[in-house]
């Protein structure tokens, strides 16, 4: 990468790809996840030679349970999504994959659609009968707001959760997301997504209380997956190089 491109490599929505071939969210999501876990990320690059990415995380001697142990301890009741179908519409393949995986692990049947038009077609054909829809706000063709409006008009009672890399102060987002609509800011953790989806299945009074406690278009990065020590003794680093 050139020095100019490198300087903007972690900037949300910055991409060197042609229009429609990239959203510029990949590295910004990686940056957010690493920062959430208390570590830095840096990049070095030289034109014609390659790029090196270094990711570091604090380590701890705390006796933490493994992911498998947490799942076993939680038992079947932990799979709160059992029997519920969630349709995920996002034109970014990585986001779709991560969202579907996170929801499936919570027991939901998550189905991916590459954009709003594909999601609407799946519903109109009867191939997918979702209990809830998760949609990116800005997509080519049919955007998230248009998908939301179609769902509200034709399938009343199906909640819609908006997700976007734009911030709540963005004028585009303010225009496309209905006032008071459920919203989750990208990048988000799997826990933040499943929590946001789970809240939409709460009884009406409980959901209203939860929503009243949130600010409009609240950032949804969620909490780190584990609590790290305030002053870690050392760090573990991963270096990746592409040529």
Image (tube, rainbow, N blue to C red):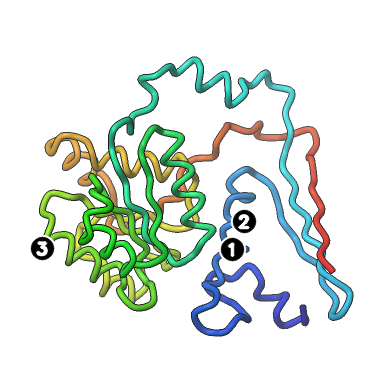
Near mark 2 (Cα within 10 A), the count class, few <14, some 14-19 or many ≥20, is: some
Percent of width and height locating residue 170: 37, 73
In percent of the image, x 34 and y 78: which residue is there? 141
In the picture, the quarter occupied by the C terminus is: bottom right
Percent of width and height locating residue 223: 49, 40
Label 2 with label 1: CB-CB less than 8 Å: yes
Dot placed on the residue nearer the N-terminal end, 1 or 3: 1
In the picture, the quarter occupied by the N terminus is: bottom right
Q: Find numbered disc 2 in the image and state the secondary structure of the residue it sits on.
A: helix
Label 1 with label 3: CB-CB less than 8 Å: no
Please, which residue is most extreme toward the right here?
Answer: 49
Q: Number of labelled discs?
A: 3
Which residue is labeled 1 in the image?
26
Above or below 73: residue 169: below
- Quadrant in the picture for residue 88: bottom left
Residue 153, numbered circle: 3
């Amino acid at each position: 990468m050139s020095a100019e491109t490198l300087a903007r490599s972690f900037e949300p929505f910055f991409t060197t790809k042609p229009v429609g071939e990239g959203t510029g969210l990949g590295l910004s999501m990686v940056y957010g996840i690493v920062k959430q876990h208390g570590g830095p990320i840096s990049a070095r690059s030289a034109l014609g030679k390659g790029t090196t990415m270094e990711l570091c995380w604090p380590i701890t001697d705390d006796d933490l349970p493994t992911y498998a142990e947490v799942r076993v301890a939680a038992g079947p009741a932990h799979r709160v999504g059992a029997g519920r179908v969630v349709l995920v519409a996002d034109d970014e393949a990585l986001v779709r994959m991560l969202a579907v995986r996170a929801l499936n692990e919570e027991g939901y049947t998550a189905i991916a659609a590459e954009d709003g038009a594909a999601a609407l077609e799946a519903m109109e054909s009867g191939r997918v009968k979702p209990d809830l829809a998760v949609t990116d706000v800005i997509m080519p063709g049919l955007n998230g707001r248009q998908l939301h409006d179609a769902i509200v008009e034709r399938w009343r009672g199906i909640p819609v959760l908006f997700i976007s890399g734009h911030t709540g102060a963005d004028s585009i987002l303010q225009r496309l997301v209905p006032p008071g609509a459920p919203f989750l800011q990208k990048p988000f953790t799997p826990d933040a997504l499943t929590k946001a989806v789970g809240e939409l299945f709460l009884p009406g009074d409980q959901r209203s209380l939860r929503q009243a406690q949130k600010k409009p278009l609240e950032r949804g990065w969620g909490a780190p997956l584990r609590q790290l020590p305030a002053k870690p003794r050392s760090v573990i680093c991963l270096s990746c190089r592409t040529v």
